[in-house]
Amino acid sequence: PRRPIPVPALSKKAMIMKLLHVDSSVLGTNSVSRQLTADIVADWRRAHPHTTVDYLDLAVDTPNHFSADALGIKVGVQAEPTEAQRRENEVSERLVTQFLAADVIVIGAPLYNFTVPTQLKAWIDRLAQTGRTFKYTDKGPVGLATGKTVIVASTRGGMYSTSEGGQAMEHQESYLKVVFGFFGITDVRIVRAEGVAMGDAAKAAALQAARADIDVATGKAANQDVASLAA
């Protein structure tokens, strides 16, 4: 009789998961979103011990806002780029390569003036590259950055999720879900602390709610569909 072909066990290297930890708050040690992203990453590593972490602080290592010199990622790298164009092309390539290499991305996203910090938007502008994170087809755009999990630490001074008016005012969580969905990422998990500027009691309640969100967000495996997360 034919002997079964042995199946090799997964090596430790094959089990390693890459996590990209991104902060964008300008408040340093006073930042609630930074506190939450640190807690998320720590809990994720406890639940998934074969995780390596790469860290990006957008308040310190801030890419320039998208400009004519950065257009190489949209129209093709220039045949003879200027020094400024070469520098911007290198920044874009570094950031999109780092993003695509990650299995899990933890993002600190405070609400500034009803949307995300400009530093975070500048980073996303560098990730939005046709042929890398999305492509256009005759049926419309298709995301290429599939198979990833994004966990957003959403912090807000006021309350926005509890009313239709508040939900209409925020372009933070809604924006991030849309843009990462455009990139092909369907597993976007939200850890929310809102009302943190409405007094000590409200802040404590917000952090307690966020703690419960962290338990849920880090307790499930990476790359789950929406139905699985809701179960």
Image: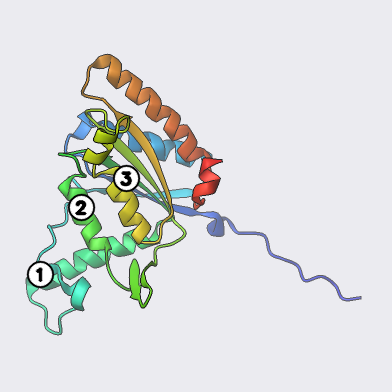
Q: Residue 122: percent from the left, percent from the top?
A: 18, 55
Disc on res. 107: 3
The amino acid type, in three-letter code, at marker 3 is Ile
The quadrant of the rendering that contains the C terminus is top right
The amino acid type, in three-letter code, at marker 2 is Lys
Circle nearer the N terminus (1, 2) = 1
The residue identified by callout 1 is 69
Secondary structure, mark 3, is strand
Q: Residue 152: percent from the left, percent from the top?
A: 35, 43
**Residue sitting at the far right:** 1
Q: Residue 13: percent from the left, percent from the top?
A: 53, 58
Marks 1,2: beta carbons within 8 A: no
- 120 vs 10, left or right, is left
Mark 2 neighbour class, 10 Å CA radius: few under 14, some 14 to 19, many 20 or more: some
Viewer can see residue 55? no
Marks 1,3: beta carbons within 8 A: no
Mark 3 neighbour class, 10 Å CA radius: few under 14, some 14 to 19, many 20 or more: many
Q: Nearer the viewer, residue 106 or 61?
A: 106
The residue identified by callout 2 is 121
- Numbered label tally: 3
The residue at the point 21 percent across, 60 percent down is: 125
Cα distance in 3D space between marks 1 and 2: 17 Å
- 23 vs 219, left or right, is left
